[in-house]
Image (spheres, grey):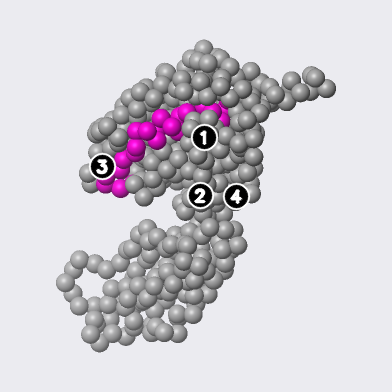
Amino acid sequence: MHSSLVRKEPVGFLRSSVRGVNGSAALELLTTLISIPSESGHEAAILEFLEKPLSLNGVQIRHQRVGTQRHNLVATFGHGTDYHVLFNTHVDTVPSYGRAVAEAKVTQRRIWGRGACDAKGSLSAMCTAFLHLVRMRSIRNGKVTLALTVGEEFAGDGIARFVRAGKPYDCVIVGEPTDLTIAHSQAGYVEVNLAVTSDRSHAFAPRSSQPIMVAAECLTALNTAVTDITAGVGRLFVRRVEGGSHDNFWYIRPGCEIRALANAPSNKQIDRLRAELSRVISGTLPSFKGVRIVFRIVEWDYGIDAASATRAAQMLAAGLELAGVAPTFTHLPSWTDGSTLAQAGHSVVTFGPGRLNDAHSSNESVRTGHVVAAAKALVGTVLMMEARHRYALRRQARE
């Protein structure tokens, strides 16, 4: 369908408009953004830097307060009512551990540094596309909003505040590293907490099983269940393990606690995980002596279903074609702010430069060409929305 959309519109004008995107400016912006630390909870400086260039004539700027001294930055332009496109990405990053530093390292084909692909590459592309569209002054029938949200890496509190405004959007593109593929579905997750306790007793004449060993066996059982339920697609991620002590005394350590998350690609599998993981733990109880096990589901999320993303996927595919990139589709195995937007009723896809397995790593990087291509594809998507509505209006006038 996206190919036919491109053919019906004045392709030469649209493609020349896309080619006019300033790629050098996008890359310069990215290197600057990497140099501004924005670890989750400390996003004020980067938003202050971005607000000035976004405050052009005709752009409405809003702050959405998210806790003490934190806010989302939301910019909107256009006065039409036929469509509303949302670009959303987060400005926060994980900490700069290892070799991933706050200062950008630039080579001919890559830019390195914390946040390079998650998600400052997308942030740079979206800001560049937004400013290009504003300066074109060609958007007459709709609106474009750029929502820069905080806290995605930590708690999702920024996007939770954003959706409370309740505004409708026809096409939502969430900036995350997808290697320029259109992620039209996204995994959900189940978060669990396992606590194992016992009374203290001698290490080599114990009255009970060791809580740490019991927790390890339970973790193995959970991992096997996740693999079986998701047919090998899902993973169990251990966020935290607490237990033991640093003293030298020989006694059974009385407690161990584990927090873990399992992902799954479909709503049905999320529901199965919620139901069956508890039964897996209950089934292990007879194997252990003298321990107490408390297992609970902390929270869960259903992710994004491909069917709900169809409209946004079609428009972004047309935008990619205008940018000279053949559109391809993928499933994203990780949670993003897009899930919250999808659950609010929007048609959402995830898209951006960089690879997910480079994100959060000690040598995080993004390809320079992908940042520029992403900006062009975003411009193309909005221009296709505008052209489609102009075409419909002309057809109505002839009829």
Relative vertical location of residue 79 with respect to residue 338 in this rendering, above or below: above
* Amino acid, disc 3: Ala
Q: Residue 243: name its quadrant.
A: bottom left
- Report the residue marked by disc 4: 306
Sequence-first disc among 4 and 1: 4
* Amino acid, disc 2: Thr
Q: Secondary structure at mark 3?
A: loop
- Report the Cα–Cα distance between label 1 and label 3: 30 Å
Q: Mark number for residue 100?
A: 3
* Magenta region, residue range: 360-383
Q: Mark number for residue 330?
A: 2
Report the residue at 39% width, 79% height from top: 291
Main SS of residues in magenta: helix
Q: Residue 103: name its quadrant.
A: top left
- Report the Cα–Cα distance between label 4 and label 1: 19 Å
Sequence-first disc among 2 and 4: 4
- Report the Cα–Cα distance between label 4 and label 3: 34 Å
Disc 1 residue crowd, few under 14, some 14–19, many 20+, Cα 10 Å: many
- Does the stretch in magenta take in 381? yes
Relative vertical location of residue 135 with respect to residue 381 in this rendering, above or below: above
* Amino acid, disc 1: Leu
Q: Position of residue 304 (x, y in %)?
A: 57, 49
Q: Secondary structure at mark 2?
A: strand
Q: CB atoms at circles 2 and 4 under 8 Å apart?
A: no
- Report the residue marked by disc 1: 320
Relative horizontal placement of residue 180, taking residue 86 as reference (left or right) = left
Q: Nearer the viewer, residue 5 or 91?
A: 5
Disc 2 residue crowd, few under 14, some 14–19, many 20+, Cα 10 Å: some
